[in-house]
Amino acid sequence: MKIIDTHLHIWNLEELSLPWLTGEGPVLNRTYTLEDYENALGSDPAYQVEAAVYVEVDSARTDKDRENAFIIGCCADGGSLFQGAILSGYLNEDGFKEYMGRYLDVASVKGVRQVLHVPEALPGTCLGEVFLENVRWLGEHGLVYEGCVRNGELGDLYEMARSCPGTTIVLDHMGIVDPDIISRENPTEEEAAYRRAWTGNIRRLASLPNVVCKVSGLNPAGAWTDDTLRPAVDICLDAFGEDRVMYASNFPVCNVATGMAPWTGALDRITRKRGEDFQRKLFSENARRIYKL
């Protein structure tokens, strides 16, 4: 199976400062290279990653330009796995257009992400007038906005996407959902409410034609099987349909719970019942079209 990975991170902690790694354990608080990624999938000939999209790593503000230069250079290397990049940017600030204007002629730059699940990002940040204006500006220039929000704020992302119909909005990690809760056979009342809220928000987001979903980011707390992941995956696939879903590894963050190879194999098995055409779209074809690779 040919794969385009739409959500790959690498970072060199000698070159970039990643404040969010403070307090993280050894799984993440280390340098990750492209070689580490290539080794993580293993030697299974059934899977071949033919291209990848780099997604910004929430580096320190002072390191943004350095991070951008690094990944644009990687994409310019004809032999690199990277064929596109999602840069970091502060869409809630007036200087955003000037900042991004420097990259409009760089073919490998496909869009922008501002992580909104961090403490300094208050609920409703993506609904500010400056933020909305900048999201619309991205669409005018053929760039996507990657939405990475707290699960409880998916309603904000829906309102933002509805207000910016000319911009493709990519929902990261299925809305950062807890697969253990979604798959629990006997949920508590609170867990049942969580599932209803998340499912409702996914369906609302999917009702907007400019929203697409990365199938990724599932982090079960302990031992897991395909059945732990299947309910959440199926809800997203059923809601968004075959043309607006994309495979993503979320490497190396996936190492906290599932790992690259186990996640890829599980998603393959979960989706086989949908047929080869569906899998081709999920694992590569949609990504090529949406990111214009």
Image (cartoon, rainbow, N blue to C red):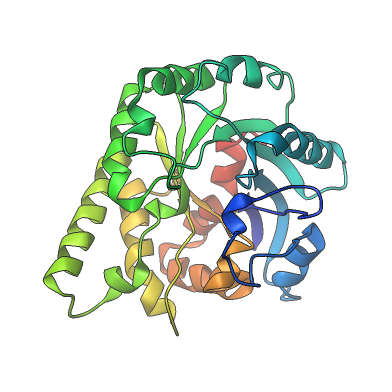
The answer, for residue 90, to whether it is visible in the render is yes
What residue occupies the far bottom of the structure in this picture? 223
Above/below status of 192 relative to 157: below
On the image, the x and y values in percent for residue 147 come to: 45, 40
- Left or right: 155 as drawn, with respect to 193: right
- Left or right: 286 as drawn, with respect to 116: right
Above/below status of 198 relative to 272: above
Above/below status of 168 relative to 149: above
- Left or right: 120 as drawn, with respect to 52: left
Taking depth in this image into account, of 15 and 22 the one nearest to the observer is 22
On the image, the x and y values in percent for residue 229 come to: 40, 71
On the image, the x and y values in percent for residue 82 come to: 75, 46
Residue occupying the point 32% across, 22% down = 163
Residue occupying the point 49% across, 58% down = 216
The answer, for residue 6, to whether it is visible in the render is no
- Left or right: 19 as drawn, with respect to 39: left
Q: Quadrant of the C terminus?
A: top right
Above/below status of 289 relative to 195: above
> Residue 159's quadrant in the figure?
top left
